[in-house]
Image (spheres, coloured by chain):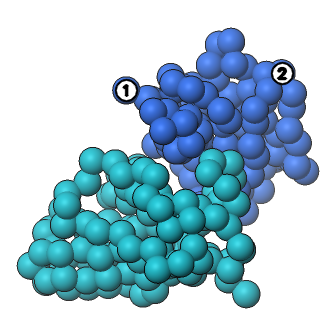
Chain colours: A cyan, B blue
């Protein structure tokens, strides 16, 4: 029973394509997050949703669009992929806004 | 700008050694400091610290926070090869008050 699960685990695609990463949590948490971990292993917040409402939207290109159909799911759609988008993307959730965050296993995106 | 600085960036020790990992921060609206362990995939939660001077302990790992001097340390005693990982420090706070700002991590390698 994986608490925070992401699909796919690996994604290899060409520049210019559009792709989505899905995230689901079965912890009953209210808040979900997307992070990007670049090649230097630096983990940086991208978005956060609380009960389907966007609460954190860091400076990321508007090619990245999060969508939360319900509080257990937070998907990330990326348009017109660029080489610099290659990274590991982590989804996380917390019971409320703030506090301990539980991470998914990550999606390794490679843009060729 | 919110900042979390970890030191050292990497560390190689022998099994049985004791290590101390450092984390200093400058974050507005500080709420808590968290330590995570990242092996190959998802960061896994270790400790959450909110009060100064109170040590949190779990087996061979312990951590303490100094809110006056704005730092925390993570101690690992009698290290084992299974402790090899990247240890991430994150501070909750910032403009949104609930987001985590991560340090770059300390890569610990424990050799037999």
Q: Residue furthest toward the left? A: A16
- Residue A2 figure quarter: bottom right
Q: Which chain letter goes with mark 2?
A: B
Q: Is residue B65 above or below residue A97?
A: above
Can residue A41 be seen from the camera position used here? Answer: no
Which is nearer the eye, B72 or A52? A52
Q: Nearer the viewer, residue A95 or A39?
A: A95
Which residue is labeled 2 in the image? B53
- Residue A62 visible (yes or no): yes
Looking at the picture, tell me which residue is in the foreground, A87 or A31. A31
Left or right: A80, with B14 as reference point: left
Same-chain check, marks 1 and 2: yes
**Nearer-N-terminus badge (1/2):** 1
Sort mark 1 into few (<14), some (14-19) or many (20+) by Cα contacts within 10 Å.
Answer: few
Q: Residue at x 18, y 75 (%)?
A: A79
Q: Residue B77: give x, y in percent of width and height.
A: 83, 42
Residue at which label 1 appears? B1
Q: Is residue A80 left or right of residue A32?
A: left
**Circle 1: element type:** loop
State the image coordinates of residue B80 (x, y, percent, origin top left). 77, 56
């Amino acid at each position: 029973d994986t608490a925070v699960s992401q699909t796919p685990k690996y994604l290899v695609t060409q520049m210019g394509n559009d792709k989505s990463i899905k995230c689901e949590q079965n912890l009953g948490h209210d808040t979900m997050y997307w992070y990007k971990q670049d090649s230097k292993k630096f983990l940086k917040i991208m978005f956060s949703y609380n009960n389907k409402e966007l609460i954190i939207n860091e400076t990321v290109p508007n090619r990245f669009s999060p969508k939360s159909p319900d509080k257990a799911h937070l998907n990330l759609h990326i348009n017109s992929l660029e080489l610099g988008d290659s990274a590991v993307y982590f989804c996380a959730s917390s019971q409320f806004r703030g506090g301990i965050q539980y991470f998914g296993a990550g999606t390794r995106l490679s843009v060729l | 700008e919110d900042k979390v600085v970890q030191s050292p960036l990497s560390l190689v020790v022998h099994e049985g050694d004791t290590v101390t990992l450092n984390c200093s921060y400058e974050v507005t609206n500080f709420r808590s400091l968290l330590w995570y362990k990242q092996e190959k995939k998802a960061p896994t939660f270790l400790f959450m610290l909110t009060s100064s001077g109170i040590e949190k302990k779990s087996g061979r790992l312990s951590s303490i926070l100094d809110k006056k001097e704005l730092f925390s340390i993570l101690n690992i005693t009698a290290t084992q090869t299974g402790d090899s990982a990247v240890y991430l420090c994150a501070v909750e706070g910032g403009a949104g008050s609930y987001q985590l700002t991560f340090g770059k991590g300390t890569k610990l390698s424990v050799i037999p």
